[in-house]
């Protein structure tokens, strides 16, 4: 998970290079600034997240990284809104990405608020969900590569993947948290 998250997170930075490649999305050029902002902030959250589940959780380093994670998600979410509503494959994809964004910012803010109240177990549970949603960046690319590799047209695959990249992640995170002893106290990276 850490390797995949780091790879996608670092790969997102390529869009900020002076000779940046064009993203393989039809609406990229029209939304370049918001896309690059979303990619950089989302990539940062994707790379920070796994390290939050390891080591001491009450350290200054954990709190600093946690604040950076929350800030990155807030920026990525805001930048995602104009991208989502202009999804080239239509309203099903747009709604999928808008719901993903809403779930992501909500779980993150609920986790942050729980930490501020000192409710650490609740904080952990919300942040496991938040990171499962952040990881949708990885699952989206895996599903899209698989679909296109299987000959499925982008216009057919993308609306489905707009939902499939995050709903199963969230369901799996919830199932993991609900297992016996699943307080989220020990979250594997």
Image (cartoon, helix red, strand yellow):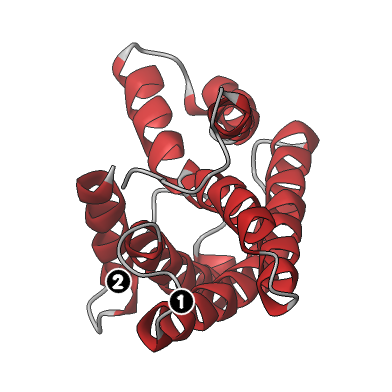
Q: Secondary structure at mark 2?
A: helix
- In this view, the residue farthest toward the front is 181
The residue lying at 58 percent from left, 34 percent from top is: 177
Whichever of labels 2 and 1 marks the residue nearer the N terminus, that label is 2
Question: Which quarter of the rendered picture does the N terminus lie within?
Answer: top left
Residue at mark 1: 58
Assess disc 1: are there few (<14), some (14-19) or many (≥20) residues with their C-alpha within 10 Å of its C-alpha.
Answer: few
Asked if the residue under mark 1 is in contact with the one under mark 2, i.e. CB atoms within 8 Å, the reply is no
Left-right relation of 100 to 63? right
- Examine the rendering and report whether any part of residue 86 can be seen: no
The residue lying at 67 percent from left, 63 percent from top is: 111
The residue lying at 31 percent from left, 47 percent from top is: 189
Residue 112 image position (x, y, % from top left): 67, 71
Q: Secondary structure at mark 1?
A: loop
Q: CA distance from mark 2 to mark 1?
A: 30 Å
Q: Nearer the viewer, residue 177 or 49?
A: 177
Q: Quadrant of residue 124?
A: bottom right
Q: Quadrant of residue 21?
A: bottom left
Residue 71 image position (x, y, % from top left): 57, 80
Q: Quadrant of residue 152?
A: top left
Between tags 2 and 1, which lies in front? Answer: 1
| Label of residue 73 in the image | none
The residue lying at 31 percent from left, 51 percent from top is: 5
Assess disc 2: are there few (<14), some (14-19) or many (≥20) residues with their C-alpha within 10 Å of its C-alpha.
Answer: some
- Examine the rendering and report whether any part of residue 153 can be seen: yes
Residue 181 image position (x, y, % from top left): 54, 31
Residue at mark 2: 13
Residue 180 image position (x, y, % from top left): 56, 23
Q: Is residue 61 above or below residue 162?
A: below
């Amino acid at each position: 998970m850490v390797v995949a998250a780091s790879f996608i997170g670092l790969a997102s930075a390529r869009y900020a290079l002076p000779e940046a490649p064009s993203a393989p999305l039809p609406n990229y050029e029209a939304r370049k600034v918001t896309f690059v902002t979303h990619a950089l902030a989302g990539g940062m959250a994707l790379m920070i997240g796994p390290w939050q589940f390891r080591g001491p959780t009450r350290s200054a380093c954990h709190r600093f990284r946690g604040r950076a994670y929350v800030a990155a998600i807030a920026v990525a979410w805001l930048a995602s809104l104009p991208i989502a509503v202009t999804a080239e494959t239509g309203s099903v994809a747009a709604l999928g990405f808008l719901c993903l964004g809403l779930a992501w910012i909500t779980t993150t803010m609920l986790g942050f608020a729980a930490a501020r109240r000192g409710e650490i177990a609740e904080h952990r549970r919300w942040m496991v969900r938040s990171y499962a949603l952040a990881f949708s960046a990885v699952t989206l690319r895996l599903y899209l590569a698989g679909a296109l590799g299987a000959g499925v047209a982008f216009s057919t695959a993308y609306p489905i993947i707009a939902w499939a990249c995050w709903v199963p992640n969230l369901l799996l995170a919830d199932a993991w948290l609900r297992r016996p002893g699943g307080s989220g106290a020990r979250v594997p990276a």
